[in-house]
Image (cartoon, rainbow, N blue to C red):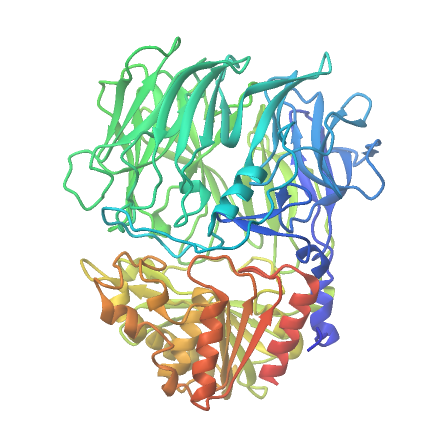
C-alpha cells in the first residue's frame, strides 16, 4: 500500500519545528546556534547502504547511513541576542560535527557533499568558513572524524590515498564457519560480517589515515600509521597520543567494537613509542552482567597530570560470579613509558569511572549488578598505597536517596576535571531531586573534610528547573533549563553566587492547541501493596466523574528492580511541561483520548529471586491496578482501553493481551515475541536458554498466541538493527496469529531501524495506530 496521512491534528505534531542546536564555547558572551530540520524524508533512508560488522555505512560518502545534519550556522550574543552570519559554506549545506577550538579562536564543522564529507574551519574573527580537506574524510564508523588538539592543531581521519575502487563481489561459493574451543554467551547482534567479501568491504570502507592540520601554517601531514582507527586520545600536555586500531582476524559473531584490537602510544609527531596491548576478539565473555575482558581495558589519561596513563585490569578473571577480594585494579605508566606498570587503586566491585582533580583527590565509581550497588570512593593518585575513603554507598534504584552526580569542568587544554569550590575544599553535586512530592532538581556542595552536604540551589514551584552544567571556564555560571505546565523548556544562565540570570532562549509553545490539556501524576497500589504511579494526560476541559468516560491509551516499558520500595518511587515532576513526541502515546490527547503514559511496570525480584521468574504475573498485576484506578476515577471507559509499547514495551503488550481481558486491543512496535531466538539473554536476563528453558518458553508471547483474543497491531522497522528485535520476530508472531485466526495486523516500515525517523514512516505509523483504535 502507499504511505497514508493521519488526521490533521496528529500530522501537525510531526511538523513542529525542532529546537535549534546550541553549542557553548570558551567565549563569555558568544555561542554557536544552528537549525535542525524536522523529520527527514524517506529518501534519506533509501540512500545506498552496506551493513558490515554491526555498522551501517553509506558507500558513496564514507559516512554512517541516514544521518541528518543541521543548517544555518550562526553566532548569537548572550546579552543582546545579536546574531552574526557565518559565510563561506556551499548553498543549502548539510552540516554536522560542530566543535569549538579550545581557545575559541575557531570553529570546526563538516559539510556533507554527494561524494563525501568535507571539513571546514571557521575563523571567529572573520566569521569566514573555508575548507581544509577535500570530500575525502572517512567517517564510516561514526563519531566525530576530527578533533582540535590545542589552539593550532586538528587531527582528521581521511580515506587512504591509494585506496582504489571498492572490492567487487566474487562468484558466490559456500560460506563455512567452524566453532571455537571454550564456552561463551554472545547476544544476537545484527548486520554482522557473513563472507570474505564482507570482510574486504569492511576493511576498505573502515580503513583510514589520520592527518595533522596546522592552522597557523595551513600544512597537512600524515599522522601515525593507517588502519581501522577506533579511538584517539591526547595527553593533557599535548606531547603524546593514545590510539586504538581494530585488527584482524575479523569475527562473524560480534560487531567490530568487539573485534581484536591494538592499543599504541605515539608522540606528537605520530611516531610509535610503545605498543600497550594486543587484545583478542571478545566473543566468549561470561553471560553475567559485569563480565569484562581479562586484558587491560579502559585506557585513559589522568586529566590533572601532564602525561600519566591509567588503565584497568580485572582481578576476578573477568567474571563477577567468581569469588574475589578485589574485582578490578588500576595501573599507570609515566614518561618515557618504557618501564613496568605501577599498581594503583584496588576496587572491591567492578570499575565504572574515575573523576580526576589533583594529586590528593580523585573519585572512583565501582558497582555490582546483583544488588544494584554503586560506591563512590575518594582516593589519592599521588599516594597509591593510601586507603581510599568511601564517600557514598548507594543502591542506584533508590532515587529518593540519590545525592546526585559530581560535576566537572573543562580545562584550557580541553581535559575534564572535578569542579571544586572554596579553594578546592568542596565539590559540586547536581541531582534529580526525586521525592514523594515529585522531582525537584538541585545543586549541592560536598565538603571533602566533613562529608557534609549543603544544598545551594533547588528547583522552585510552579516551575520544573534543571541545572544542566556549568559554563566552561566560567565556574560561577550554570546553564538552567526551566519549564512549567504552560511553558516549554527555555534555557538561562544563572549565577550561583548572586542569583543573576541571563535568558538564552525564548522558544514559543510548540503546540498552542494543547496549551490547556491536563496533566497529573496519579498514585495507586498494586494488589500486593507495591506503590505505583503514572502520568495521566487528559484533553482540555474534561472533568473525571462528571463527563462521559474516555477511551484510553496506556503506554509502558517494564523495568526490573531488586526491592519493592524502590519500584514504587515517583520519578517525575508535577510541574513539567508536556513534551509531545510523535513516537509516544501523547498525540492521542488531540483525538479526545485520555493517555496514561509511562504507567509503572516494575518487575521485582528480591534477594536471590530473579525478576523474570514472575514476569507474567507481575505485568498482569501492574495492569490490573492501573485499569482499576482509571475506571474508579471516572476517566476510562472500560470497554475502550488500549495498551501499547515499543521494544520491551511491545513484548509487555503481547503478554497483556495473552494473559488478561482488560483491553480492547494492543499496539506492539518493534518487539521480540519468541525468546528462544535470543538464547543468550535479553534485557537483564543473565541465564541462557539452556540454563532456564522454562523461563524462555513462558516469557515468549509466541507460545501463548492461542490465548490472544483482542486485536493486536504489530509495527516493525524493516531494517531493525537492535539486538534481539529482528523484523522476523513480528513476522513470525503475525504468522502464528494469522494461522490461529486471531485478529491482528502487521505493518513493516521500509528502511526503518529500531526507532523510526522518516516523516513518511511516522505519519503512516500514526495513521495505523489511529485507525486501530477507532
Residue 57 in view of the camera:
yes
Q: Position of residue 767 (x, y in %)?
A: 66, 76
Q: Position of residue 634 (x, y in %)?
A: 50, 84
Front position in the image: 379 or 55: 55
Residue for point 42% across, 61% down:
724
Where is 232 relative to 337, above or below?
Answer: below
Q: Quadrant of residue 470?
A: top right
Task: Give the total number of marks visible in the rendering.
Answer: 0
Is 287 on the left-hand or right-hand side of 403?
Answer: left
Where is 152 relative to 173, above or below?
Answer: above
Front position in the image: 447 or 310: 310
Is 537 on the left-hand or right-hand side of 346?
Answer: right
Q: Quadrant of residue 413?
A: top right
Q: Position of residue 494 (x, y in %)?
A: 61, 35
Where is 401 relative to 763, above or below?
Answer: above
Residue for point 26% across, 73% down:
528
Is 208 on the left-hand or right-hand side of 505?
Answer: left
Location of the C terminus by quadrant is bottom right
Residue 471 in view of the camera:
no
Q: Position of residue 220 (x, y in %)?
A: 68, 18
Where is 732 relative to 750, above or below?
Answer: below
Is 109 on the left-hand or right-hand side of 318?
Answer: right
Front position in the image: 693 or 183: 183
Location of the N terminus by quadrant is bottom right
Amino acid at each position: 500500500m502507499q504511505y497514508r496521512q493521519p488526521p490533521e491534528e496528529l500530522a501537525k505534531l510531526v511538523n513542529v519545528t525542532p529546537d535549534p542546536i546550541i553549542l557553548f564555547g570558551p567565549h563569555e558572551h558568544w555561542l554557536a546556534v544552528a537549525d535542525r530540520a524536522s523529520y527527514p524524508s524517506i529518501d534519506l533512508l533509501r540512500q545506498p547502504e552496506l551493513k558490515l560488522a554491526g555498522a551501517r555505512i553509506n558507500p558513496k560518502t564514507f559516512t554512517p547511513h541516514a544521518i541528518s545534519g543541521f543548517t544555518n550556522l550562526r553566532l548569537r550574543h548572550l546579552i543582546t541576542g545579536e546574531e552574526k552570519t557565518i559565510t563561506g559554506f556551499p548553498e543549502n549545506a548539510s552540516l554536522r560535527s560542530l566543535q569549538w577550538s579550545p581557545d575559541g579562536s575557531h570553529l570546526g564543522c563538516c559539510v556533507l557533499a554527494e561524494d563525501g564529507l568535507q571539513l571546514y574551519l571557521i575563523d571567529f574573527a572573520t566569521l569566514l568558513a573555508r575548507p581544509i580537506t577535500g570530500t575525502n574524510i572517512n567517517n564510516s564508523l561514526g563519531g566525530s572524524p576530527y578533533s582540535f588538539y590545542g589552539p593550532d592543531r586538528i587531527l582528521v581521519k581521511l580515506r587512504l590515498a591509494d585506496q582504489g575502487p571498492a572490492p567487487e563481489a566474487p562468484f558466490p561459493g559456500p560460506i563455512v564457519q567452524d566453532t571455537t574451543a571454550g564456552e561463551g554467551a554472545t547476544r544476537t547482534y545484527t548486520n554482522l560480517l557473513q563472507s570474505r567479501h564482507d570482510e574486504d568491504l569492511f576493511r576498505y570502507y573502515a580503513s583510514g589515515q589520520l592527518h595533522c592540520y596546522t592552522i597557523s601554517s595551513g600544512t597537512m601531514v600524515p599522522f601515525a600509521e593507517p588502519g581501522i582507527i577506533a579511538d584517539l586520545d591526547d595527553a593533557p600536555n599535548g606531547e603524546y597520543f593514545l590510539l586504538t586500531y581494530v585488527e584482524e582476524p575479523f569475527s562473524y559473531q560480534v560487531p567490530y567494537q568487539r573485534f581484536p584490537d591494538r592499543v599504541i602510544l605515539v608522540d606528537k609527531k605520530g611516531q610509535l613509542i610503545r605498543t600497550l596491548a594486543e587484545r583478542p576478539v571478545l566473543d566468549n565473555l561470561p553471560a553475567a552482567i559485569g563480565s569484562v575482558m581479562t586484558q587491560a581495558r579502559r585506557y585513559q589519561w589522568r586529566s590533572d597530570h601532564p602525561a600519566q596513563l591509567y588503565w584497568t585490569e580485572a582481578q576476578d578473571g573477568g567474571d563477577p560470579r567468581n569469588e574475589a577480594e578485589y574485582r578490578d585494579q588500576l595501573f599507570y605508566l609515566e614518561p618515557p613509558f618504557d618501564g613496568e606498570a605501577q599498581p594503583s587503586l584496588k576496587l572491591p566491585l567492578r570499575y565504572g569511572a574515575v573523576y580526576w582533580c589533583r594529586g590528593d583527590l580523585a573519585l572512583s565509581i565501582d558497582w555490582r549488578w546483583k544488588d544494584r550497588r554503586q560506591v563512590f570512593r575518594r582516593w589519592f593518585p599521588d599516594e597509591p598505597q593510601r586507603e581510599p575513603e568511601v564517600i557514598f554507598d548507594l543502591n542506584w534504584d533508590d532515587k529518593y536517596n540519590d545525592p546526585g552526580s559530581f560535576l566537572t569542568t573543562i580545562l584550557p587544554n580541553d581535559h575534564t576535571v572535578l569542579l571544586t569550590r572554596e579553594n578546592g575544599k568542596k565539590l559540586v553535586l547536581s541531582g534529580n531531586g526525586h521525592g514523594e512530592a515529585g522531582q525537584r532538581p538541585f545543586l549541592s556542595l560536598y565538603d571533602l573534610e566533613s562529608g557534609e552536604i549543603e544544598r545551594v540551589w533547588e528547583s522552585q514551584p510552579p516551575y520544573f528547573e534543571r541545572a544542566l552544567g556549568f559554563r566552561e571556564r566560567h565556574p560561577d555560571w550554570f546553564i538552567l533549563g526551566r519549564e512549567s505546565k504552560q511553558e516549554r523548556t527555555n534555557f538561562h544562565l544563572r549565577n550561583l553566587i548572586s542569583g543573576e540570570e541571563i535568558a538564552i532562549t525564548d522558544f514559543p509553545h510548540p503546540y498552542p492547541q494543547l496549551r490547556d490539556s491536563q496533566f497529573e501524576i496519579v498514585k495507586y497500589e498494586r494488589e500486593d501493596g507495591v506503590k505505583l504511579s503514572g502520568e495521566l494526560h487528559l484533553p482540555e476541559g474534561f472533568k473525571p466523574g462528571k463527563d462521559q468516560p474516555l477511551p484510553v491509551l496506556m503506554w509502558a516499558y517494564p523495568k526490573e528492580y531488586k526491592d519493592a520500595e524502590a519500584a514504587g518511587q515517583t520519578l517525575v515532576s508535577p510541574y513539567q511541561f508536556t513534551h509531545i513526541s510523535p513516537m509516544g502515546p501523547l498525540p492521542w490527547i488531540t483525538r479526545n483520548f485520555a493517555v496514561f503514559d509511562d504507567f509503572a511496570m516494575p518487575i521485582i525480584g528480591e534477594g536471590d529471586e530473579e525478576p523474570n521468574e514472575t514476569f507474567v504475573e507481575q505485568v498482569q498485576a501492574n495492569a490490573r491496578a492501573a485499569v482499576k484506578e482509571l475506571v474508579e476515577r471516572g476517566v476510562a471507559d472500560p470497554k475502550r482501553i488500549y495498551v501499547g509499547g515499543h521494544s520491551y514495551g511491545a513484548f509487555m503488550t503481547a503478554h497483556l493481551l495473552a494473559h488478561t481481558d482488560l483491553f480492547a486491543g494492543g499496539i506492539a512496535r518493534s518487539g521480540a515475541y519468541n525468546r528462544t531466538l535470543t538464547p543468550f539473554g535479553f534485557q537483564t536476563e543473565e541465564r541462557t536458554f539452556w540454563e532456564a528453558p522454562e523461563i524462555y518458553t513462558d516469557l515468549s508471547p509466541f507460545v501463548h498466541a492461542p490465548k490472544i483474543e483482542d486485536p493486536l497491531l504489530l509495527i516493525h522497522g524493516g531494517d531493525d538493527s537492535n539486538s534481539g528485535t529482528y523484523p522476523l520476530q513480528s513476522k513470525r508472531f503475525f504468522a502464528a496469529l494469522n494461522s490461529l485466526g486471531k485478529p491482528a495486523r502487521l505493518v513493516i516500515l521500509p528502511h526503518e531501524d529500531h526507532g523510526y525517523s522518516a516523516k513518511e514512516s511516522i505519519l503512516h505509523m500514526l495513521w495505523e495506530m489511529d485507525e486501530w483504535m477507532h
